[in-house]
Amino acid sequence: MENAMEGDVMVPQEKVSQEPGKFGKDALLVAGAILLASLIVAGSIVGGTKKLSSTAQAPSTAEATPSDKAAQQPAKVTVTQEQVKALFTDKNIMFGKKDSKVLFVEFSDPSCPYCHVAAGKNPTLSKQMGQQFTLVKDGGAYVPPVPEMKKMVDEGKAGFVWLYANGHGNGEMGTKALYCAKEKGKFWEAHDLLMTDAGYTLMNNTVKNDKAQAGALADFLKTATNVNEMKACLESGKYDNRMVDDMAIAKQFGFQGTPSFFVNTDNFSGAYSFKDIQSTVDKYLK
């Protein structure tokens, strides 16, 4: 995926002799005409560039779209271990214990393509994103971090918290569905369905943030949760405020884009391969 970038347009200025004694009035008129033409051309080019940039379909600035490690910038705030532990409350979607040596936090958006890449359930999209995100089983080298984090939680080696952050714009209903599924102990089942290629298409093309699509979303998740219960939960509005609450937490953690992961207080902003996170995990496991 290419990022649209707006830059300065440099127009070279030609040196024009200002010696009227040598060239006379005609030369001055010619010089003035050249300068005026240059200014008009420069203005057209700059104006055209600004117009192009404002209409180009660039990726959302809230999406973390890493091309390499150097492109990733850590959050500009200091996050403490106490802040991380404070997220382990029944109010949030969390698994494991807050006194584990390793605590994972994920800020995610069900409609975000790079969140899908990190979840590892959408190989079609992963391939479209480029070789660096192609899964190992498909001949690439990318190891999605979310399944590895879940594995460590299941093994009792880590704790995990999932929070919403607006990274793509169409994930509010999907997030509410995840909170509804969490009530029934079916978060991961619903999560893994939403993170498939079909889930991505549904989120971004059909459901978006439209509560009128609650039935369609509930039907899509029917193998994970009860359709009627899910639909009623989505329509009740009981989790409408979670978007605001989760985003407030994300900002406290220096939110820059989705997905954003924390390993204790170490931030990995972007769809990192777990290979790049492993050394930090091992540091805390010692």
Image (cartoon, grey):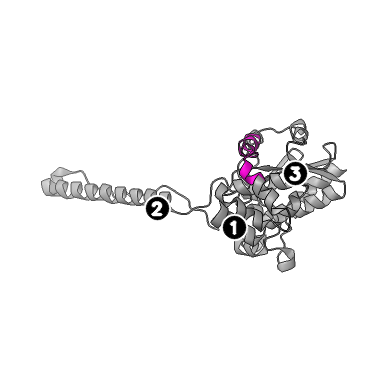
User: Which numbered dot is residue 52?
Assistant: 2
Secondary structure under the numbered disc 2 in the rendered image: helix
Secondary structure under the numbered disc 3 in the rendered image: helix
- Above or below, comparing residue 67 to residue 24 in the picture: below
> Which secondary structure type mostly characterizes the magenta part of the structure?
helix
- Going from N to C along the chain, the mark reached first, 1 or 2, is 2
User: Which numbered dot is residue 202?
Assistant: 1
Quadrant including the C terminus = top right
Q: Residues within 10 Å of mark 2 (few under 14, many from 20)?
A: few
Determine whether, in the image, residue 193 is placed left or right of residue 60: right
x, y (%) of residue 188? 75, 52
x, y (%) of residue 277? 75, 49
For the magenta stretch, what is the residue range? 233-249
- Above or below, comparing residue 119 to residue 239 in the picture: below
Camera-side residue of 96 and 67? 96
- The alpha-carbon separation of the residues under discs 1 and 3 comes to 23 Å
Q: Which residue is mark 3?
A: 183
User: Residue lying furthest bottom in this view?
Assistant: 139
Q: Amino acid at mark 2?
A: Leu
